[in-house]
Image (cartoon, rainbow, N blue to C red):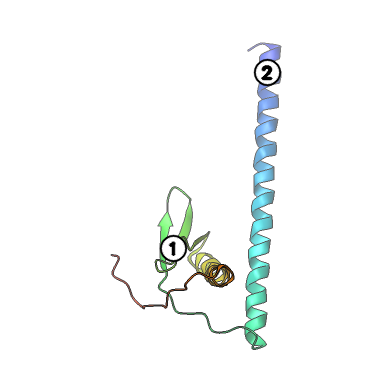
Amino acid sequence: MGRDDAGEAIENKLSKDNAETQSAQRKRREERRALAQIRNVIINYRLGGEKLMPRYEIIIYWSQGDEAFIAEVPELPGCAADGKTYKEALANVEIIIQEWIETAKELGRPIPAPRGRLAFA
């Protein structure tokens, strides 16, 4: 490997490391935002400002490709979240359910009533 090749290899490595650092920082920001949302939900609930969440079925599974737990709400099209742990995925999808319902209301779209346990297995 010549001197130019070594320099290029070092530059490539630094560039890759920088991209990974930016990705990690972005992920931490998203996690902090999610935690802040969870705290707000908890505070609102304790203060009586939050209605009980409708009881939609939530399916949680491990996704090897995403290296995360995925929580899906089959009754609400496109409503899903992920998390590093089962509990994190559940907490995240509870926030997404609320946001899904709020968005549907704002757009004047129908909100399906929870039907309880569905037969997807």
Q: Residue at image x 67%, y 63%?
A: 33
Q: Position of residue 3 (x, y in %)?
A: 70, 13
**Nearest the eye: 106 or 56:** 106
Mark 1: which secondary structure? Answer: loop
Lateral position of residue 7 relative to residue 88, left or right: right
**Circles 2 and 1 in contact, beta carbons < 8 Å:** no
- Mark carried by residue 77: 1
Q: Nearer the viewer, mark 2 or mark 1?
A: 1
Lateral position of residue 91 relative to residue 7, left or right: left
Q: Earlier in the sequence, mark 2 or mark 1?
A: 2
Mark 2–mark 1 distance (CA, rounded to whole Å)? 51 Å
Q: Which residue is mark 2?
A: 6
Q: How many marks?
A: 2
Q: Residues within 10 Å of mark 1 (few under 14, many from 20)?
A: few
Q: Residue at image x 52%, y 80%?
A: 53
Mark 2: which secondary structure? Answer: helix
**Nearest the eye: 98 or 63:** 98
Q: Position of residue 60 (x, y in %)?
A: 42, 64
Type of the residue with mark 1? Pro
Q: Residue at image x 42%, y 70%?
A: 58
Which residue is most to the bottom? 48
Location of the C terminus (image quadrant): bottom left
Q: From what the image shows, is residue 46 above or below residue 26?
A: below
Location of the N terminus (image quadrant): top right
- Find residue 52 and report its image quarter: bottom right
